Amino acid sequence: MNEILKKHAHKVNVILSKYPPEQKRAAVMPLLHLVQQDAGFVSRTALEDVAEICGVTATEVASIVGFYTLFHDHAGAKIRLQVCTDVACDLRGAREYLKNLCAALNLQPGETSPDGLVEIEEVKCLAACDRAPMFQAQIGDELEYHENQTVDKTLDWLSSMLASMKKTPEKPAKSAEGGSHE
Amino acid sequence: MSENLLLRHRQTPGLNQSKIYLENEGFSAWKKAVTSLKPEDMVNEVKASGLRGRGGAGFPTGLKWSFLPNTIWPHYVVANADESEPGTFKDREILEYNPYQFLEGLMLASYAVRAQAAYIYFRGEFWQIAQKFDERIAELTAAGYLGDHLFGTDYSLRVYTHLGAGAYICGEETALLESLEGKMGQPRLRPPFPAVYGLFGMPTVINNVETLTNLPIIFGRGVEFFRSYGTEKSPGTKIFSLSGRVKKPGNYELPLGTTFRELIYKYGEGIINDAKPKAIMPAGASSALIPATEAALDTHMDYESVGTLGCALGSASVIILDETTDTSALVDDTVHFFKHESCGKCTPCREGTFWMSRITERIQSGKGSKEDIELLKSVAMGMQNKCLCALGEFSIVAVLSAIENFRADFDAHVES
């Protein structure tokens, strides 16, 4: 039984209705986003479920998961911190910020903390070049922007997030402190 | 600063609420078009306006629309909201704060080419923005601005959002189409061009967010008004995303043809610590490093004038480097960016960016030699004019111009 259809029949239909009936493959990426909202990553079963709905092979869906950096094929940290160190951000000290943040968290870029809660990644261009240093927090499939950062500011935010997660261990509440796009 | 036409929310706050947008002549151009204009006249109007694509290529928008054949249906319009060029953050401001003007532009473009379905392709990171657009589209449909038989005519239009998932290459229009069709974002061979064989194999117009946001101005206030800004060949205003070593980075909407000096010193308030500017990158990471000479600073920022500096204006993401910037480290940055974002389809780009990154890394680590600088140059030259799409071609522009203009920065890493 197709778990996605079972759980999200309505959402799946809304997604499919966006594309011509003979172009179901176009729904692959929206369905993968739907899966990640639930689980935080795309499992092997989910891959097959998406393939079945779109009438393509699981291999083809896997190629999409592999190609796009926002899709993950394994469970990652609860909070993924993605720091942009691209040219424009670096000219405003992003690399130095990342270095100091990594030192404070005792993590290297690409590493996850031993408790599995925090991962730090170095990424390229998030269209916020005028407000660097900045990072994007990926929590489940939700993304938040945090701009004009200092290491202290980031650590404060992170400890308040971790504290709220301890209270409700299942899913951390969306942070109160701005961070969103609007 | 001239009047904000695209960043209109700066003088009329709250424009991202439909009520306020409607109170400020919102959707009047749309209603006028659907009820009284002929699509072919609209194409001619946009041709006459001289509007050029704001995503990077600067191709005349009306001309692009006129390539759609009237013998193959349906037609599609796709808005490119995959803003990812390092240094570019203009579309994001429009999408967040002036979304209805962009939507109205998308709707006008759709009517002009008689498309009954339009898609907005957002970069995956704009997830929250896309969600808001879903709400706005539902609201406009309920209010009769979108949907079937608009304003009692036989024209129907639906607008859909589609989210990418983190791939710079999807800003390239044929890669974007592949991605929208549920495939890896790898560029297509051209011809056929999207105007004939685009989304789902149908004639398709793909326009950048800022380009589309110009349309309600052209159809609302007229071609003459639009052309009163900018230059003869580059009419209108443009949003310049200013970043790097300036005191006041940000988006500035200015008439095309404004000088770099004005942008940097008047609006950006000069260089951090009042240092000397070293180079200008007018088109983000895809840009050449133009030495910030007096002549360069006095160059007008329009498509033709910037071209004379040996560089494209692109999406006008102006990154400023100052005398503290090591351009060889910067090139190491851009090369790694392109290596990461190369889609892997064509060999010159996939292999070239990989080998360039090995060499720039070696130079940066202090283990390089003088020959490595020549080797880097030769790999870059070997890629020139051989890549399937612009990504590969752009990856070498910063490399070659930095070595040519700032050779000492590279020598400093290999001398000892």
Image (cartoon, coloured by chain):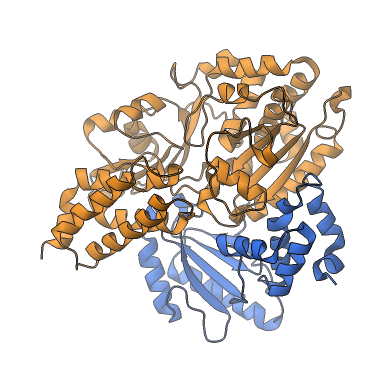
Which of B170 and A76 lies nearest the eye of the viewer?
A: B170
Please give the count of numbered marks on the rendered protein: 0
Instruction: Tell me, by letter, which chain the rendering colours orange.
Output: B
Question: Could you tell me if residue B259 is visible in this image?
Answer: yes
Taking the spot 85% from the left edge, 72% from the top edge, the residue there is: A1
Taking B299 as reference, is B207 left or right? right
Which of A140 and B197 lies nearest the eye of the viewer?
A: B197
Compared with residue A144, is residue B72 higher up or lower down, i.e. above or below? above
Question: Could you tell me if residue A89 is visible in this image?
Answer: no
The picture places residue B48, in percent across and down from the top left corner, at 56, 14
The picture places residue B260, in percent across and down from the top left corner, at 34, 33
Compared with residue B13, is residue B380 higher up or lower down, i.e. above or below? below
Rendered hue of chain A is blue
The picture places residue A179, in percent across and down from the top left corner, at 59, 60
Taking B292 as reference, is B189 left or right? right
The picture places residue B52, in percent across and down from the top left corner, at 51, 26
Taking B344 as reference, is B28 left or right? right
Residue closest to the far bottom: A114
Figure quadrant of the C terminus of chain B = bottom left
Compared with residue B296, is residue B120 higher up or lower down, i.e. above or below? below
Compared with residue A127, is residue B262 higher up or lower down, i.e. above or below? above
Residue closest to the far left: B416
Q: Quadrant of residue B30?
A: top right
Which of B215 and B298 lies nearest the eye of the viewer?
A: B215
Q: Quadrant of residue A90?
A: bottom left
